Image (cartoon, rainbow, N blue to C red):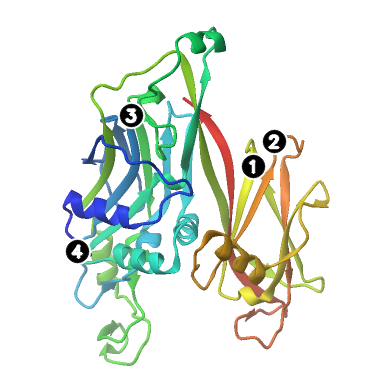
């Protein structure tokens, strides 16, 4: 796909990506892609805040366009630097009470989990840096699901029967933030950027400066930056930071005070972990439940998945399901969802109700099969094997507009 920033090209990319489990009906209203800009100065090592104005009745897609500065001669950016550039991304909706927040690791896992293998390959090509421009599309359909209607206080079901709700302004199976029902005049995008040094590709063969030996040309190696290069890099600032917002517009829509809109949303939590193997070969990871209604998916990403024999979720000392083989659960997920996942991503459907458990946390139990001779393991001075993996848990809950 062309890397021009015509709105039609951006929307064409979004339309080529997988949608939520429920297929949205055709909506005949106009979709406008409108750029939004930060409230302050955008730079590296800084939290950038964009107050996104309400320009429509719904919003389901965001598109970040970040233009990086030119680098000194002999230095280049890592082609896939987006997850190093975006350290954290969060969106606050509905008068600031609801928030979607991701670390860079969680963003990467969400991108893997929501795409077929071929779609993910196309996605990687799209977010690869080109002409110093880094792009990142965020599809809110991965977080906002269908909605349902309940009468507000003082409005009886009989009142609604006499005067039924015939128009909720926005379809109940719209997958996005329901601006028209939120009663807010803006929502907030916060993006914390990393250092410019995190984005550099310093591991390729090139002429580079080594203070003691002068200029050298060698095979593949790490480039050693001189003090003058470091000082020059520290002076560089972002050229541009823009957020394109896809609004669904309808000038006739209005707020209806007779009823509440309750929308199902997904919350993703997780992080990176490194297991130090011991004689038990069982790893127990505590996961908070908070106020979530249901746990629906377990996502694991590891370069050594064959070392994870089985997994299960434990609550109040009881396994919620029998320990399940990781490869088998992946095959089952692919079969049920008609999808082919990327090699290092493993997803298991759980669909477990958490509302009445009375617990504040649960445990992810992994059984590991370590072998010191396996090159996939790192070996430390304590003679423990290590295996690194990323995990995420997908919860379902609701918000009220």
Residue under circle 4? 2
Position of residue 224 relative to residue 290, above or below, is below
> Residue 35: x, y in percent?
21, 42
Residue 186 marker: 3
Considering only order in the chain, which callout, 4 or 1, is on the residue closer to the N terminus? 4
Residue under circle 1? 294
Callout 3: SS: strand
Q: CA distance from mark 4 to mark 2?
A: 47 Å
Q: Are marks 2 and 1 in contact (CB under 8 Å)?
A: yes
> Residue 58: x, y in percent?
34, 33
Callout 4: SS: loop
Q: Say whether residue 176 is left or right of residue 162.
A: left
> Residue 348: x, y in percent?
62, 59
Q: Residue at x 70, y 40 (%)?
A: 354
Considering only order in the chain, which callout, 2 or 4, is on the residue closer to the N terminus? 4
Q: Looking at the image, which is closer to me, 311 or 80? A: 311
From where the camera sits, is residue 156 visible? no
Q: CA distance from mark 2 to mark 1?
A: 7 Å
Q: CA distance from mark 2 to mark 3?
A: 31 Å
């Amino acid at each position: 796909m062309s890397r021009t920033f015509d709105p039609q090209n951006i929307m064409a990319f979004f339309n080529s990506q997988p949608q939520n489990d429920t297929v949205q009906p055709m909506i005949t209203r106009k979709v406008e892609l409108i750029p939004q800009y930060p409230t302050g100065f955008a730079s590296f090592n800084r939290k950038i805040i964009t107050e996104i104005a309400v320009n429509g009745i719904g919003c389901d897609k965001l598109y970040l366009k970040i233009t990086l500065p030119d680098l000194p001669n002999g230095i280049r950016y890592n082609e896939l630097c987006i997850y190093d550039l975006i350290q954290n991304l969060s969106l606050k909706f509905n008068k600031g009470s609801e928030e979607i927040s991701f670390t860079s690791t969680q963003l990467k896992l969400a991108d893997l989990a929501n795409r077929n293998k071929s779609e993910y390959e196309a996605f990687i090509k799209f977010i690869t840096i080109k002409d110093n421009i880094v792009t990142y599309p965020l599809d809110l359909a991965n977080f906002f699901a269908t909605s349902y209607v309940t009468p507000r206080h003082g409005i009886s079901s009989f009142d609604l029967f006499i005067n039924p709700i015939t128009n909720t302004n926005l379809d109940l199976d719209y997958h996005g933030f329901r601006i028209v029902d939120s009663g807010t005049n803006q929502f907030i995008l916060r993006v914390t950027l990393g250092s410019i040094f995190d984005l550099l590709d310093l591991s390729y063969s090139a002429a580079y400066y080594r203070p003691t030996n002068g200029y050298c040309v060698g095979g593949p190696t790490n480039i050693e930056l001189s003090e003058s290069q470091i000082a020059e890099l520290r002076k560089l600032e972002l050229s541009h930071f823009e957020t394109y917002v896809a609004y669904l517009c309808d000038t006739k829509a209005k707020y209806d005070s007779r009823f509440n809109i309750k929308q199902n949303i997904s919350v993703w939590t997780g992080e990176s972990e490194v297991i130090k193997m011991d004689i038990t070969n069982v790893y127990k990871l505590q996961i908070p439940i908070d106020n979530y209604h249901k746990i629906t998916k377990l996502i694991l990403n590891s370069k050594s998945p064959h070392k994870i024999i089985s997994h299960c979720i434990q609550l109040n000392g009881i396994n919620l399901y029998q320990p399940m083989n990781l490869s088998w659960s992946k095959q089952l997920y692919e079969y049920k969802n008609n999808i082919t996942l990327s090699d290092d991503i493993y997803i298991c459907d759980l669909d477990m109700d958490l509302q009445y458990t009375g617990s504040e946390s649960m445990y992810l139990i992994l059984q590991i099969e370590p072998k010191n001779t396996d090159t996939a393991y790192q070996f430390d001075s304590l003679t423990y094997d290590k295996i690194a993996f990323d995990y995420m848990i997908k919860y379902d809950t609701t918000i009220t507009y």
